[in-house]
Amino acid sequence: MDRPVLVFDGDCGMCTRSAELAARRFRPSPDAFDISPAQRLDLGALGLTVAECDAALQWVGADGRVSSGQDAVARMLLASRPWARPLGALLLLPGVNTLAGIVYRWVARNRHRLPGGTPACSLPPAP
């Protein structure tokens, strides 16, 4: 892979708006990393599944390493504009990362209720 890619759920309005915000405000240039809905990608080639992409944001590094959820946010921030990079490093700190994971999972479970959310944003029930 030539460059990293941030993979989001393109069926979710909140996720799409967040990805657009990342592209406008955080990404230093269009060639720094790609931002794409999971529905438009060959997920297998990226080492991802539909279920993983439905459940959480995914970051696939140029080296093929996959990060999910709050770790994907942190990796995206580390690759972003210089002012955002310390936030990415902060999110990876052990205690902060644990707390960020709790918040991320709560937002993911409730994204259909948040601004920009629609019924299509709902996660399938846990098995």
Image (spheres, rainbow, N blue to C red):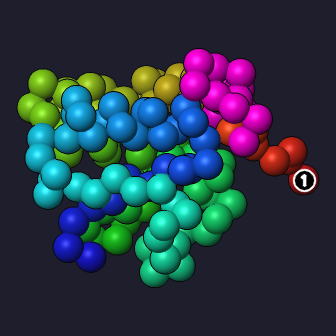
- Which amino acid type is shown beneath numbered disc 1? Pro
Residue name at image x 37 percent, y 62 percent: 60
Q: Position of residue 82 (x, y in %)?
A: 9, 32
Residue name at image x 69 percent, y 32 percent: 118
Residue 105: quarter of image: top right
108 in magenta: yes
- Determine whether, in the image, residue 42 is placed left or right of residue 22: right
Q: Is residue 91 visible?
A: yes
- Determine whether, in the image, residue 68 is placed left or right of residue 76: right
- Given residues 102 and 41, the one toward you in this image is 41
| Pointer 1 residue | 127
Residue 73: quarter of image: top left
Residue name at image x 53 percent, y 79 percent: 44
Q: How many marks?
A: 1
| Residue 123 drawn above or below residue 1 | above
Task: For mark 1, give the secondary structure.
Answer: loop
6 in magenta: no
Q: Position of residue 3 (x, y in %)?
A: 21, 66
Alpha-carbon neighbours of circle 1 within 10 Å: few (<14), some, or many (≥20)?
few
| Residue 126 drawn above or below residue 53 | above
- Given residues 16 and 111, the one toward you in this image is 16
The region drawn magenta spans 106-120
Residue name at image x 16 percent, y 52 percent: 30
